[in-house]
Image (cartoon, rainbow, N blue to C red):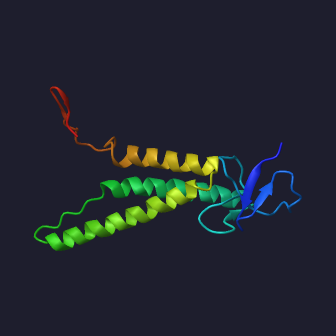
Amino acid sequence: RETDQMDHGGQMATGNSTASPKKMVMHMALYWGKDVWVLFANWPGHSVGQYILALIVTFLGAALVEYLNVCRFKLEGRHILDGFLQAVIYGVRMFFSYNVMLAVMSFNFGILFAAVIGNGVGHWLFETRSFRKTPIKSSLKEGGLCC
């Protein structure tokens, strides 16, 4: 069965081509495998160890995005500096969000799962307050939810 893929030069390659086994192709659908480029050319390449490192970096990046979602500074009497720090945090969060999105666009199932699990674990750790000692007051009101 032939599969169409695009190499990183923009040329179409078919699944029955006689290209060298080390040539990287850009997959046009989700796939499994360690041979992937994530964010940078030739990284992680063909190494299993580097692929595992890419999974860990993607997981941590996604969890960091969730942490930055709840990161708030409140400086008493310094509204301009407080606003500036919030803008910087927002910019850093967007930087990591876009990098996780670009990693997922490698179409590799492992990278996709690392990003989704990283977001889930980050949300659980930082946003659900599961590890806080103070109880959470119910935000439910009669007749609906209060967000």
The residue drawn where x is 14% and y is 72% is 78
Q: Is residue 80 above or below residue 6?
A: below
Q: Quadrant of residue 5?
A: bottom right
Residue 39: % across, % down: 59, 65
Residue at 39 percent across and 62 percent down: it is 93
Quadrant, the C terminus = top left
Based on the displayed image, in which of its 4 quarters is residue 26 positioned? Answer: bottom right
Q: Is 142 above or below relative to 20?
A: above
Q: How many numbered marks are there?
A: 0
Q: Furthest residue to the top? A: 143
Left or right of 3? Residue 79 is left
Name the residue rendered at 49%, 56% in the picture: 60
144 or 124, which is in the foreground? 144
Residue 42 spot, x, y in % from top left: 69, 68
User: Where residue 83 appears, x then y in whole percent?
Assistant: 21, 68
Q: Residue 77's x, y, as percent?
A: 10, 70
Return the residue found at the far left.
77
Q: Nearer the viewer, residue 74 or 105?
A: 105
Please give left or right for residue 52 compared with residue 126 in the image: right
**Does 67 sit above or below residue 23?**
above
The residue at the point 64 percent across, 50 percent down is 108
